[in-house]
Image: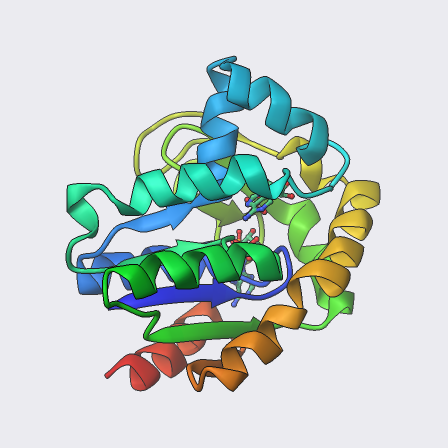
């Protein structure tokens, strides 16, 4: 099963993608996590990506597409995957589509987690991320068992540099201009499903599993 998560930054794509990955035993692939890992390790890719991420801008397609295509070609992707944060532009979606076409495959579901902009800023300022394993928490809605520490891997949780209010506003702008057109793209392909992302995360997940069942 190949699934794409769509939605504004902070809509809950990563939270739901991780739950889907656990239930269906497929990898959760987040291009944002891959970039953050590279920033943390000071790689050349990380240094290049950081310039864009800190502004709330998108990393150029040339860099992003290659990383994603390399990742989905790995062995653990044989039974499918859930993509979180990719594609984010029409050219990215087209490259993915062509690559899948060439091997006679396709995306099965594009799940749009719908959350209005008003809710997003509040969510992002409370988000805490583990840069080690990619897990995400919220200080009110999804607190870790021990404050500031990741339940999954025991590492320290941080407020992402790009979750500051000014950057979040830019990211929302970029989302509306560059990523929202993908809703049309996947509607035309007949695979788009929209869920209400404003309800409790367990209820969002129930709506998603009802679609995937
Ligand atoms: P995205 O991957 O779309 O950027 P995240 O999954 O990281 O979004 O979620 C953004 C923030 O909102 C996180 O702090 C997360 O814990 C929290 N969150 C996710 N889903 C919900 C929900 N249904 N209700 C309230 N908070 C949520
Ligand atoms: P995310 O963790 O998905 O919110 O992504 C964080 C940041 O990484 C984004 O604001 C972009 O700068 C960059 N990024 C992640 N995925 C992509 C992508 N598919 N295309 C371009 N930039 C991306």
In the displayed structure image, the side of residue 21 where residue 121 appears, left or right? right
149 or 90: nearer the viewer: 90
5 or 165: nearer the viewer: 5
Q: Which residue is at a point 36% across and 34% down the rendered structure image? A: 133
Q: Quadrant of residue 152?
A: top left
159 or 170: nearer the viewer: 170
Image label count: 0
Percent x, y for residue 4? 42, 64
* Residue 148 visible in image: no
**106 up-or-down from 174: above or below:** below
Q: Which residue is at a point 47% across and 55% down the rendered structure image? A: 95
* Colour mode of the rendering: rainbow
Q: Which residue is at a point 70% across and 59% down the rendered structure image? A: 178
194 or 146: nearer the viewer: 194
Question: Could you tell me which quadrant the C terminus lies in?
Answer: bottom left
Question: Could you tell me which quadrant the N terminus lies in?
Answer: bottom left
Quarter, ligand 2:
top right
Percent x, y for residue 196? 55, 80
Q: Quadrant of residue 78?
A: bottom left
Percent x, y for residue 114? 60, 75
Percent x, y for residue 153? 31, 31
**131 up-or-down from 112: above or below:** above
Q: Which residue is at a point 59% across and 46% down the rendered structure image? A: 127
* Residue 145 visible in image: yes
**40 up-or-down from 201: above or below:** above
């Amino acid at each position: 099963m190949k699934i794409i998560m769509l939605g504004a930054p902070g809509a809950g794509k990563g939270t739901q993608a991780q739950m889907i990955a656990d239930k269906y035993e497929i990898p959760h692939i987040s291009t944002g996590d891959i970039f953050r890992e590279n920033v943390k390790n000071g790689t050349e890719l990380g240094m290049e990506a950081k310039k864009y991420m800190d502004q709330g801008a998108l990393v150029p397609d040339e860099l992003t597409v290659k990383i994603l295509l390399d990742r989905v070609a790995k062995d653990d992707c044989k039974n499918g995957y859930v993509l979180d944060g990719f594609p984010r532009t029409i050219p990215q979606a087209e490259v993915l589509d062509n690559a899948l076409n060439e091997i006679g495959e396709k995306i099965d579901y594009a799940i749009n987690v719908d959350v209005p902009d008003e809710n997003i800023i509040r969510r992002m300022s409370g988000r805490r991320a583990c840069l080690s394993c990619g897990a995400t928490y919220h200080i009110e809605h999804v607190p870790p068992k021990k404050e500031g520490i990741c339940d999954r891997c025991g590492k320290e949780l941080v407020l992402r540099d790009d979750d500051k209010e000014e950057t979040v506003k830019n990211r929302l702008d970029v989302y509306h201009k560059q990523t929202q057109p993908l809703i049309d793209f996947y509607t035309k392909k007949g695979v788009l499903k929209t869920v209400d992302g404003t309800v409790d995360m367990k209820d969002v997940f129930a709506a998603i599993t009802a679609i995937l069942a």
